Image: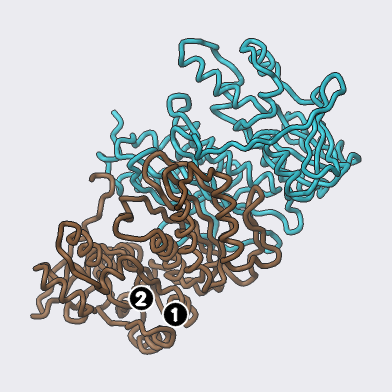
Chain colours: A brown, B cyan
Amino acid sequence: MSRTLAQVGEFGLIDRIHEIIRDEGVALPKNTLGIGDDCAAFQPRPGYDLLITCDCMVENRHYLPQFISAHDMGRRAMTLNISDVGAMGGRPCYALISLGLRSDTLLEDVIAIYRGFLMELNPFQAFVIGGNVTKSTGANFIDITLIGEVESGKMVRRSTAKPGDVILITGYPGQSAAGLEILLQSESGKTWGDNPLITAYQCPSHRAVEGHAVAKTALANAMIDTSDGLLGDLGHICDESGVGAELYEKDLPISRALRQFAEASGGETLDWVLKESDDYELMITCNPEHVAHIRNTVTGISHTPVTEIGNITANKGGIEIVGYNGDSRRVELSGWDHFSK
Amino acid sequence: MSRTLAQVGEFGLIDRIHEIIRDEGVALPKNTLGIGDDCAAFQPRPGYDLLITCDCMVENRHYLPQFISAHDMGRRAMTLNISDVGAMGGRPCYALISLGLRSDTLLEDVIAIYRGFLMELNPFQAFVIGGNVTKSTGANFIDITLIGEVESGKMVRRSTAKPGDVILITGYPGQSAAGLEILLQSESGKTWGDNPLITAYQCPSHRAVEGHAVAKTALANAMIDTSDGLLGDLGHICDESGVGAELYEKDLPISRALRQFAEASGGETLDWVLKESDDYELMITCNPEHVAHIRNTVTGISHTPVTEIGNITANKGGIEIVGYNGDSRRVELSGWDHFSK
């Protein structure tokens, strides 16, 4: 029977976390100082810039514990940070993990979360270099700072898209949001059985290896991950680059599972593809002549499809969607306000 | 009248935070990428190792909002991270800040917290490079990741104390805990008036400039900050260095305010000096012949006293306190378990 943190105590928890990191994580390189002093320390590699991102997942806000296992929660929290590093063209190296945990949290759940972190870090030979645990009186939270590196001069920003660029997208955005919707509906008695959309919610993939490879080609003008949804992140590219975009509805990649779900649920398929969804696909813009090279770079790494969905325009801040009938309509980007609800 | 976060919304809050960082923080150096892309980025300086620490402060656990202003809370949260960097011999460079905030939090309080961060960062020409805000459903929290740099080969660890070393301490540990006790007592009707101990709780100092200077001398064998209390952190040095220690009660630095408070409250003065207290003093061990040089290094920077309080011994894991009468007694290090209460 698993014990709670109140039963094992803070030091019991920390000892167990250190064991897991030591036994199941990647060994620390020489000249690197992990957990155990006032700070962690490492020697940066000459010729590389450092990338840093931090993201916080709060229980019942960013994840619903009834729909996702502790292990998948750990994977997902690390995946979204790895995705940010990959979207700049880098690879992850060092993670610092801050956990806020209630006393009634089960030790085995914390261990499972950590195993989720390591499952995502180990393939990159990246490791947990520091962190802390603190008692939470409300919702549990997972706050990760991830440090990565990118070859100097190869970083790809969101602010450097150019009019005339082709917009490329990897995979099938929108699947994660649809998967969550299925789970929410199933709670009220409706069952959907096994579904790739549910997998997309519980265990989303990142495209960091692909992003790193694309950056090395130096052929991408802008890159971003789709963590705010396809349209939200295209909006970020347009805002930051001072450009506009047009998307072709007929070209948007829609998985068979998503199409079936949208039809069965009576919703607009387009909404699922475009709106906020916790997928971690890459959106890349590049000169049309480089599309083939970038696509081959991605597909040389994984079976992830790369789809041309539109173009960057000089129409600053304007995003238009060209429908099946050729009519174009302007899209309003409405932000998602987390404090108002 | 100040508005709540529910009223200004997430984007209103983020815009205001960006304004504060831009207008009141240090300007970003060239080749450094701050808030606004998937990651922040910087070019590490050749010849320096990087230091990283993260610490989380949770409302009602690590700070009691009725006793500390939002501005001081921001200062304190940053101070404890700066102290960790200084205790390794480094100087702070880049901060990432993750805030968990309830919807009823006042915008002006968040602004005050940020001004507190900047007040501590600006003197180091250090800046906020990234972060995020998330809605909290329970207690508010401030989670800071601080990145510093230290000249390669100059880092001072806690694991390298040597038998025969003198133990030095800066300032007057224990004042912060006594200040909190005064505030707690005053809540039940007892008043103490203005008191330097209350200032020590609300606005503790770090010794990062001194720590950086001490590291540059290359004469300190071990260094740590006293965030776990004098005895707790001496215990860390002994554990990690595989040594023991003896402390002389007569030599422990006790401020007049702390002595008066201990006498008036009927408590043991020694307990206040030794036990857990949120002071951020430095404990340094060095060969006896280097004491004068290290003391001069510290007092050349500030009026912080540096006191010899004992010696490192070969008695692995054993800490003895030699009393006024010459009798020595072994100290048991009892950990503070945050989950059991």
Q: Chain of mark 1?
A: A
Left or right, A178 with respect to A61, comes to left
> In front: A246, or B179?
B179
The image position of residue A227, as x and y in percent, is 33, 64
The residue sitting at 63% across, 14% down in the picture is B261
Question: Would residue A206 be visible to someone looking at this image?
Answer: yes
In the rendered structure, are the residues bearing label 1 and label 2 in contact, judged by CB atoms less than 8 Å apart? yes
Q: Quadrant of residue B113?
A: top left
Residue B216 vertical placement versus B319 (above, below): below
Q: Please state, as top left, top right, bottom left or bottom right, where the C terminus of chain A lies in the image.
A: top left
**Quarter occupied by residue A27:** bottom right
* Numbered tag placed on residue A214 in the rendering: 1
Q: Residue at x 67, y 12 (%)?
A: B263
Q: Is residue A314 visible?
A: no
Find disc 2 in the rendering and name its residue: A284
State the image coordinates of residue B307 (x, y, percent, origin top left).
79, 30
Q: Is residue B55 left or right of residue A70?
A: right
CA distance for labels 1 and 2: 9 Å
Q: Residue furthest right?
A: B289
Q: Tell me the SS state at disc 2.
A: strand
Label 2 crowd (10 A; few <14 / some 14-19 / many >=20): many
For this rendering, which residue is in front, A284 or B257? B257
The amino acid on which the numbered mark 2 sits, given as a three-letter code, is: Ile
In terms of image quadrants, where is residue B291? Answer: top right
Q: Secondary structure at mark 1?
A: helix
Q: Badge 1: few (under 14), some or many (20 or more) residues near its Cα, within 10 Å?
A: many
Residue A324: give x, y in percent of width and height.
11, 80
